[in-house]
Amino acid sequence: MKKVKGFIVPAIIFCIWWRGSELGLWNAYIIPHPMKVVNAFVILFKKGILFKHVTVSLYRALLGFTISFIFAFLLAISLSFSKNLLELLERILDFMRHIPPMALIPVLILWFGIGEMSKLAVIILATFFPIFLNTLSGIMCCDQKLIEVGKVFGFSKFHIYIKIIFPQAIPSIMVGARLGFGYSWRALIGAEIIAASSGLGYMILDAEQLSRPDIIIVGIFTIGILGSTMDYILFKCTNWFLHWEKQEQRGGENWLS
Amino acid sequence: MAQLVIRNLSKKFHIHNKEITALDNINLSINEGTFVTIVGKSGCGKTTLLKILCGLEEKTYGEITTNCKNIGIVFQEPRLMPWLTVEENMQFSLLERNHEQKYLVEKYLKLLDLYSFKDAYPSQISGGMAQRVSLGRTLCYNPDIILMDEPLGALDAFNRRKLQKEIIDLFLREKKTIIFVTHDVEEATFLGQRIVALDQGRMIKDISNNLEYIRKINDIDFLNIKEEILNAILRDVQG
């Protein structure tokens, strides 16, 4: 029932869109008829154009996300070990955090050209902070009472890290990863609109120049559906990782009751 | 022979430039295989004493000498790792897993009546059961001295009495030294072979309790010992 409920509003919007287009309530150039959009989708799909753009965009998003995750994760771990390093980098990281990656596109094009590097740089910048900050806070906010348990058992700092701090930080890291991937997807489309010869962002921009609103809508839907699908996959991965937390959130099924 | 000797132990805290004495010149000698209960009001320094004994807190003055290798503690809250199952929590203190240790974990799972819940997560078990897992985890560490910091404080009266009996059973079976901290005089009398009363960081009473286990709380001797400790604490408060 919950799943069906989620489709009610989109279905109503679709009906209004369909009926409004048939009655000519708006200009067909601004909002094309749904059938026209479906036809454009079928043609793009059959010719393999859509697949090509989706593949390119996904590849960029995943590559950027992976590089960013590695960097952010390692930096957060390093900073959690060294208070001096954290104090040293705190200001510059805070400064960088407030700069929208889109604002850096002109500089990135200047530095890296209009090739893949500039787009990857935009994605890395957009993805970095949610992953970095969530990983760092997950590690820094570890429950001191649990750390005391490790100390009483004579654990070394390494074992306290591996057996207590890191497992406790996983939920926060996973939240950062989900947020980061969402950001990477948004930044990617922005970067592709500005400087690209392939990808979903480019497909939308190209359709705008060819006055093809049907293709623009196909592009928008594809981005939305792919974004939701990727988020769902990450959500499922998070649940798999955090099966114990899921039970905790549900209040657990108390075996005694 | 004394397993643990505490001489002139003091602990002072500095809060907002104000010196607070948590422990004041504590002297205590505990023999191997003794069940000692430390009783006193909240804030009298009981937990601080245990934290110093297990190395979580630094002492300000004094000396602690012991011949034991491991000291384990059961905290007020179970402090279980929520991402580990009951069995994994019990194994938590063991960095190496060999046959002997696996046997040890199984032994305590069965002994503490946790075997059928070994695959459950902490969020799926009751408070009393979680505290038993915490006790099992400490036992698997195989400590020579077990410190217990009001481990039954958060439990209801029924679970509390049940666990008190289980702790006595364990003590009689394992013959390990137990130092049990509580604010409940009846609990201290029910459990301890030796009862130490603290007030404002000072030791105000140290008496032996030779009553047979399992003690009857309505027994006249039991009530006399309880009264003696209670009077000592109240006298100290009034004086």
Image: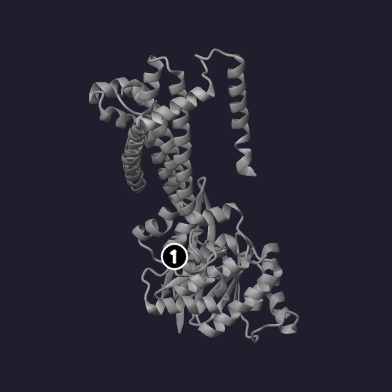
Q: Residue furthest bottom?
A: B212
Relative height, residue B76 to residue A84 (above, below): below
**Between B16 and A254, which is closer to the camera in this rendering?**
A254
User: Is residue B232 visible in the rendered structure shown here?
Assistant: no
Residue B111 lies left or right of residue A46; in this view the side is right
Q: Quadrant of residue A43?
A: top left
Quadrant where the C terminus of chain B sits is bottom right
Vertical placement of residue B144 versus B80, above or below: below
Residue visible at 48% across and 29% down? A221
Q: What colour scheme has been applied to the protein in the rendered image?
A: one colour
Q: Give the chain letter at badge 1.
A: A
Rendered position, B22 above or below A128: below
Picture coordinates of residue A96, whole percent (x, y): 36, 29
Residue A27 in view: yes
Q: Secondary structure at mark 1?
A: helix
Q: How many marks?
A: 1
Whether residue A36 sits left or right of residue B158 in the image: it is: left
Q: Position of residue B177 (x, y in %)?
A: 50, 78
B205 vs A96, left or right, is: right
Q: Residues within 10 Å of mark 1 (few under 14, many from 20)?
A: some
Nearest the viewer among A181 and B232 is A181
Residue A154 place in picture, x, y as percent: 39, 66
> Which residue is tagged 1?
A152
Which quadrant of the figure contains the N terminus of chain B? bottom left
Looking at numbered disc 1 in the image, what kind of residue is underneath it? Answer: Val
Residue occupying the point 62% across, 68% down:
B128
Spot occupied by residue A162 in the image (x, y as percentages of width and height)? 38, 57
